[in-house]
Amino acid sequence: MLGVLGVWHWKVWQGPMSQPKGVSDILGAYKGRMLAIEVKRPGKMPTPDQQRFLDRVKIEGGISFVAHSVDETMEQLTRQGGANGS
């Protein structure tokens, strides 16, 4: 679905030796900004480490969010990934 929108992205495969704790499930770039998406089942929230990673991406000017569905992903990309970067 992200590829259809022209979002350059990749899935992060988790493992204790592969990257620091909290790295989001999907990383990429969208409209010139870093993109981090933490994928969760409905009703689930990110761990503290995951939330810190999302917050840091946002602080650095990137787009980051938790997604519970495709619709939520689309909504967040539209809201955060606007042409002006707001």
Image (spheres, helix red, strand yellow):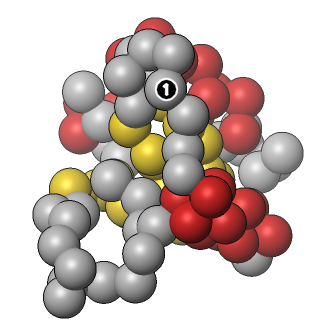
Q: Residue at x 37, y 22 (%)?
A: 41
Instruction: Tell me the crowding category of disc 1: few under 14, some 14 to 19, or many 20 or more residues within 10 angstroms, Cα based.
Output: few
Residue 11 in which image quadrant: bottom left
Q: Position of residue 81 (x, y in %)?
A: 65, 42
Can see residue 29? no
67 relative to 41 in the view: left or right: right
Q: Residue at x 54, y 44 (%)?
A: 46
Can see residue 58? yes
Is residue 84 positioned above or below 14 on the image?
above
Spot the residue most to the bottom.
17
Residue that carries the numbered disc 1 in the rendered image? 44
Is residue 85 positioned above or below 81 on the image?
below
46 relative to 2 in the view: left or right: right
Q: Position of residue 9 (x, y in %)?
A: 29, 56
User: Could you tell me which quadrant the N terminus lies in?
Assistant: top left
Which amino acid type is shown beneath numbered disc 1? Lys
12 relative to 64 in the view: left or right: left
User: Could you tell me which quadrant the C terminus lies in?
Assistant: top right
Is residue 33 positioned above or below 78 on the image?
below
Q: Which residue is at the front of the view, 40 or 78?
A: 40
